[in-house]
Amino acid sequence: MKKLTILGSTGSIGVSTLDVVAAHRDKFEVVALTAGSNLTLLKKQIEAFSPQLVAVVSADDAKKLDRMLAGKKPQILHGVEGMIAAATAADTTMVVAAIVGAAGLAPTAAAIMAGKDVALANKETLVTAGHLVMDLVKKHDVNLYPVDSEHCAVFQSMVGHRNEDVARVILTASGGPFLKWTKEQLSQATIKDALNHPNWSMGKKITIDSATMMNKGLEVIEARWLFDIEVDRIAVNIHPQSIIHSMVEYVDGSVMAQLGVPDMKGPIAYALTYPQRVPSGVKPLDLTLLSGLTFFNPDLERFPALGLAYQAAKAGESMPAVMNAANEIAVEAFLEGKISFMTIAESIEKTMNRHVAHNLTSIEEVLEADLWGRRTAREVLGIA
Ligand code: NAD
Ligand code: MG
């Protein structure tokens, strides 16, 4: 039995994780769930999975949830302390980190420090604090399994191979809804256009990140830390069909790839059960039904966010955390209708230009850099 804490259980990844758990009740027990503000869904999840502990963001929501529940109730906590309590619960053996944004960092780091294995969906954890988190993973001798589909594909393509034989990691990208849009069209893109992802159904923030291609930039940084490979050896190929989820090229010229129907239940199940495989609920792939698989290079002029992420990765130190913070602020402002689509990348660049990268030696210092990035991005955008 794996005993799970699911951080972000009401999100897209959280819900898919519970789908996998529900299909394999003999393998998993749910110890703790955490959520933002979707109390209706959280209540249903509590009734279906009977966790010992739940945590929500606000104290008000914790009280509201308590009133909504009847009969035997779990312990109900709130705030970052609540998330950390869920991540470190004594009975938990594995934490699924599926909170969105830098808010996922502190609970995920706490889980590692408490000796829990982590199935990591929250890419912002490695983007903001990659070297510290990987040090913690080593120090506390825990396993970190990637849930991001590209990184799961890379991980699968590396099983049985030696790290030193890797020549390049090739991340595939769908290209998002704006793959064929001109710069002029992009300047007019609406929220609805940007949320209309062709292949994946995901939370709003990552869907916007896919439209700007910042998502792929965050994934380059995530891969840099997960697989201990320099950014210069991480390439991005646009692959609109999203069938090949990523590849690893070896020094002998061989390329290993992982293929499948795009459905996050695949990578989630693999992370939860590695090295075993279980039926995940993903439909089988029939290549004969596809009209073709195509690949090309990304256009950094139309998608400057990807280039900014490479720049931040090369600058290292506090720059990726600041870039990530500026991105979170800009995406939020775009989703609130306050700024245009192309302003997202412009404001990230301006925020990065104001930042002098410095060494980060603790999670607290990462959170300070994150706050600096948020403040500066708001100044750049002229929003409160
Ligand atoms: P989502 O918005 O659907 O869900 C996020 C979850 O986090 C929700 O449960 C929400 O209530 C909770 N949450 C939000 N803000 C919080 C806060 N401040 N404190 C605590 N909890 C908070 O997001 P998602 O699409 O499920 O993505 C989750 C993470 O997984 C992101 O980091 C994303 O980049 C990554 N990821 C998602 C997918 C996908 O297919 N959705 C794929 C790869 C990676
Ligand atoms: Mg991904």
Image: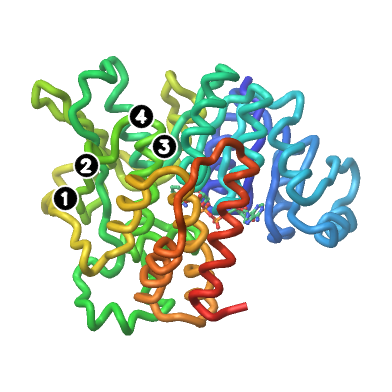
Mark 4 or mark 3, which has the lower sequence index?
Answer: 4
Question: Of 115 and 33, which appears nearest the observer?
Answer: 115
Seen at 81% across and 60% down, the residue is: 61
* Residue topped by disc 2: 286
Query: Looking at the picture, does residue 314 appear above or below residue 188?
Result: above
The Cα–Cα distance between marks 4 and 3, rounded to whole angstroms, is 17 Å
Q: Which amino acid is tagged 1?
A: Leu
Q: Is the CB of the residue bearing disc 1 within 8 angstroms of ligand 2? A: no
The Cα–Cα distance between marks 4 and 1, rounded to whole angstroms, is 31 Å
Mark 2 or mark 3, which has the lower sequence index?
Answer: 3
Q: Element under label 4?
A: loop
Q: Is the CB of the residue bearing disc 3 within 8 angstroms of ligand 1? A: yes
* Residue topped by disc 3: 267
* Residue topped by disc 4: 227
The Cα–Cα distance between marks 3 and 1, rounded to whole angstroms, is 22 Å
When asked about the image quadrant of residue 243, the answer is: top left
Question: Of 247 and 12, which appears nearest the observer?
Answer: 247
Question: Of 99 and 240, which appears nearest the observer?
Answer: 99
Seen at 62% across and 51% down, the residue is: 368
The Cα–Cα distance between marks 2 and 1, rounded to whole angstroms, is 7 Å
Q: Are marks 2 and 3 in contact (CB under 8 Å)?
A: no
Marks 4, 3: nearer the viewer: 4
Disc number placed over residue 290 in the picture, else none: 1
Q: Position of residue 186 (x, y in %)?
A: 28, 78
Look at the image and tell me whether residue 167 can be seen. Answer: yes
Look at the image and tell me whether residue 285 can be seen. Answer: no
Q: Position of residue 211 (x, y in %)?
A: 34, 65
| Image position of 261 (left or right of 278) | left
Q: Residues within 10 Å of mark 2 (few under 14, many from 20)?
A: few
